[in-house]
Amino acid sequence: MKKIISHLWFDKEAREAAEFYVSTFGKESQIRHSAQLENTPSGSVDIVTFNLLGSEFQAISAGPYFKFNPAISFQVFCNVKDEVDRLWDKLSAEGMALMELGAYPFSERYGWLQDKYGLSWQIFYTGEADIEQKIAPMFLFVGDVCGRAEEAMNFWTSIFPGGQVQVFMRHEQGGEPDKEGTIKYAGFSLPGQQFRAMDSAYGHAFAFNEAISFIVPCETQEEIDYYWEKLSAVPEAEQCGWLKDKFGVSWQIVPTAMDEMMSKGSKEQIGRVTEAFLKMKKFVLAELHKAYEES
């Protein structure tokens, strides 16, 4: 199975933001592909696929419907303190600090920020630790889902092949308002992607939403059907390959063939495929191929 891809929803800034992130993270980062979809409910939308330090991202400009918040952030692991400072300076420009850059019990150099687009980043100094994946999405379980981080990790890793959970720290007695035994910091892996998770019982005024979702690339209709059945828990959220699970996290179950259609197809082919998938909830691969190959 191919890597799970982090998907970012912007109002109008997808291309600008992708270029900014690629420029900020530098080497091992690049824009892979961009396309424009016409006649969508949001009008003409830009889609940009890019890579940051080995992690795959896709961004879309599709209107001011969803806003980034710290419920999902991206942790960046650096072996050199100067790199922490450089990334902090770049990403925090025109943004805001959520936790000021400085020394903390868990890292000699760390900070949490929202960048100028509202996207949250946590920058860690890790010393000489061997970090296989330099950027990891992090889920902060708050509000109605606080205390369910471990349940979510076990659920997701039971669905995807090779999934694993590693609990690093639990909240201890006396750490109110956090409940003893809930997740203070943990990691889990899904195909091609490592994630982090934690519970926080403080009064955060945000929750998971569609601004950040995760694309599950599927080779066959059987795979699409499997992940759709396992993950979808909110019928009214089902649209154009999107679904929402029981924890409020959004996923996109997308055939890998779509990437080739959108990157290699003619304007007319892309238009027909777009028209076809806009009518779908769960993607039907045969119908997408039919639209693409229509003469």
Image (cartoon, grey):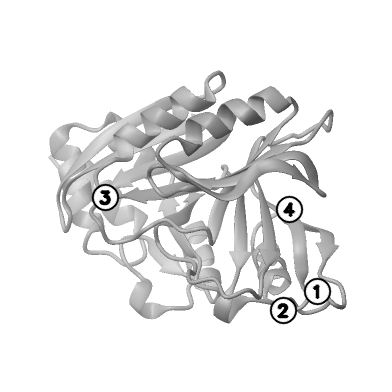
Front-most of residues 273 and 116: 116
Amino acid type, callout 1: Gly
When asked about the image quadrant of residue 187, the answer is bottom right
Q: Secondary structure at mark 2?
A: loop
Q: Is residue 181 left or right of residue 232?
A: right
Measured as percent of width and height from the top left, residue 35 is found at: 26, 35
Q: Earlier in the sequence, mark 2 or mark 3?
A: 3
Front-most of residues 43 and 207: 207
Mark 1 burial class by Cα count in 10 Å: few <14, some 14-19, many 20+: few
Q: Is residue 30 above or below residue 4?
A: above
Q: Is residue 258 left or right of residue 221?
A: left
Mark 4 burial class by Cα count in 10 Å: few <14, some 14-19, many 20+: few
| Disc sitting over residue 175 in the figure | 1
Q: Secondary structure at mark 4?
A: loop
For disc 4, the marked residue is: 162
Amino acid type, callout 3: Asp
Q: Is residue 192 visible?
A: no
Badge nearest the viewer, 3 or 4: 3
Cα separation between marks 2 and 4: 34 Å
Residue at 34% x, 78% y: name it.
Answer: 236
For disc 2, the marked residue is: 177
Measured as percent of width and height from the top left, residue 161 is found at: 68, 55
Is the Cβ of the residue at disc 3 closer than 8 Å to that at disc 4?
no
Amino acid type, callout 4: Gly
For disc 3, the marked residue is: 11
Q: Earlier in the sequence, mark 3 or mark 4?
A: 3
Mark 2 burial class by Cα count in 10 Å: few <14, some 14-19, many 20+: few
Q: Secondary structure at mark 3?
A: loop
Residue at 76% x, 59% y: name it.
Answer: 185
Q: Earlier in the sequence, mark 1 or mark 3?
A: 3
- Residue that lies at the very extreme toward the right in this rendered image: 173
